[in-house]
Amino acid sequence: MTFNIQHFIKTIILGLFLWFFIDLHTSGDILKYVNPKYEYISKIAVGIFILLFVIQLFRILQPKQHTHHICSSTCNHDHGNGHFSLARLVSYGIITFPIITGFSFEPATLNASIAGNKGSFLPPVQQNNDESPDLFENANTLAEHENIDIYSEDYLPIENNNYMSNKEYEEKVKSFEASETIHMSEDMFGTYYGAINDNLSTYIGKTIKISGFVYKEEGFNANQFVVSRFMITHCLADASILGFLTEIDEAFELAEDTWIEIEGVLDVTNYGGVEIPVIKTTEWQVIDEPSEPYVYPVLTLTS
Amino acid sequence: MQHSHHSSGNMLTMGLLIIFLIFVLINSILPFNESSISSFQQLNTIFLSILIEAIPFVLIGVLISGFIQIFITEDHIRAWIPKNKAKAVFMSCVVGSLFPACECGIVPIVRRLISKGVPLYAGIGFLLTGPLINPIVILSTYMAFGNDFRMALMRMGIGFIAAFVIAFIIGILFNSNQLKHKEPSTLKKEESIFNRVKGMLHHSVDEFFDMSKYLIIGAFVASALQVYVSMQSFLLFEDNIFYTSFVMMGLAYFLSLCSEADAFIGASFRNLFPSTSILAFLVYGPMIDLKNTIMLLSVFKAKFVFILFILITSIVFIFVHLTTFI
């Protein structure tokens, strides 16, 4: 029997991946990285890691002359039988890198700087007009706010997962349409958001309660900011920002990424030639970042 | 990191990438103030998020690849693939369309198929349609565009035709299999089923280590771009359709989104850009993007990957713009 150092290292790395994935699930941190519907597929990944880990375990100690027992020597990838080179060391380093950063850094919540890079929340204002004091006159009419109506149709039930039964979902939509106070709860955030942007006139004058983080863009007035949430469809790379333009006299005091809870009245404003909802705040308070900072599209159970 | 005589080319590619990574790392952390650490944490979070989402698909991909390696023989492949080039390309595109894969999970499968004797053009047809056309992608596109089937159908139709043409041209341009590593392996038929399954899993492990390092590098670069590059800097001449398509294809390439999720991102641009440019985004991204280019470079010769990249870019660009005449 010979001890194979390469297979030993691979076994350790597989074990670390396995541990990392299990840890993601037991700590619940997985929800800070991907949409909950990915929990199942990543549980499958845990299963595959266990299988591969066990298989790999038996390769550490190999009988001599038993290296390529099933594929020929021309087989074209690393079976870990070559000598230890710098290249191998580098490649093991790369593979361990995400595990190290994964264990050593807490998952961060996406913040306003990412929101800014994602593209404008509001219609783009052409750069050469930046100095202009009156934003509305010079604003570009090209577009509506980038993310506003993507999820609008989510308020038709999507056939898929089971966070909510169809019936429960429909009831929520119905009571939402009828009620005078809109509570932007996490589970229905995308749906309500889409509905309000689709039929803005229906909702003007209603009271709205919402919590989110402060996001500001160049061109906002001193009393304006966006109270926003990130919506995750699959993973954080596809996060898009949802939010309402909000007006508070003290807005300039609020730093970006501050979490706040506000209550106000929905109104409409014209921004860059596009009508968008605006919240005229009546009450507000700074809150702690919620344990689940993101929102997800609603998935209903149809069967 | 294959047998020693192959490793010099890989070393070079890897070396360059490592230098780039170190550069990004230093740039992001060096000023060592609160905001640089915070932006590194943002980068790290997006990076891990892409990996956590992609790794299960890569694992499934390497299991399938291991299965092909051990259980599928060259004789099977010879019997299945039509002799006629056009027919073979068409068949590979159809098989790819039925096969639910993501663009990183499919690379090890295609590599295995080609080394087993599947002609290069058929392998490429499969590589292009696998992530682009499948039930999950169609459903998410349908949902993202307001439960409207038009964009989903255009995506499938144009994608299929473009994939067919690209794979066919590849068939004309290249006669050899373009793999970095030569001759396919043969398996001994007398092995017991237990040994075969064990061999399959050994392959899967090795393939996982082979592939994941390229995925990790690609995911890191893609997330660095998200954190440090503002999308708005691209939006200079919004009214030129060729320009906007070019920008959208660039976005698709550098964001390296999973094909199941990119429809939602694409849809978010539809008030900003003409639908032709969004179609370009949706067709191009699943065929080639940053993370999968890096994976392809580990499998195929660099020259081939470069030509494939040029071909995909120009064919998709042309075909998408032809739709404006329909």
Image (cartoon, coloured by chain):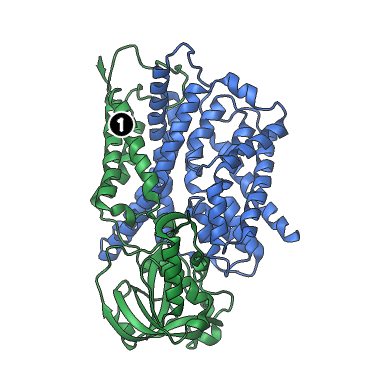
Residue in the image at 72% along x and 34% along y: B86
- Which image quadrant: the N terminus of chain B? top left
Residue B77 relative to residue A290: left or right: right
Residue A9 relative to residue B189: left or right: left
Task: Determine whether A25 is above or below A222 in the image.
Answer: above
Q: Residues within 10 Å of mark 1 (few under 14, many from 20)?
A: many
Snapshot quadrant of residue B173: top right
Residue in the image at 30% along x and 40% along y: A17
In the depicted view, which residue is nearer to us: A2 or A245?
A245
In the depicted view, which residue is nearer to us: B230 or A264?
A264
Chain holding disc 1: A
Name of the residue lying farthest toward the right:
B325
Q: Could one spot residue B233 in this view of the protein?
A: no
Snapshot quadrant of residue B304: top right
Q: What element carries label 1?
A: helix
The residue singled out by tag 1 in the image is A53
Task: Determine whether A40 is above or below A110 in the image.
Answer: above
Residue in the image at 36% along x and 70% along y: A185
Q: Chain A is drawn in which colour?
A: green
Q: Where is residue A42 in the image (x, y as percent from the top left)?
A: 37, 45
Q: Colour of chain B?
A: blue
Residue A113 relative to residue B281: left or right: left
Instruction: Count numbered badges in the picture.
Output: 1
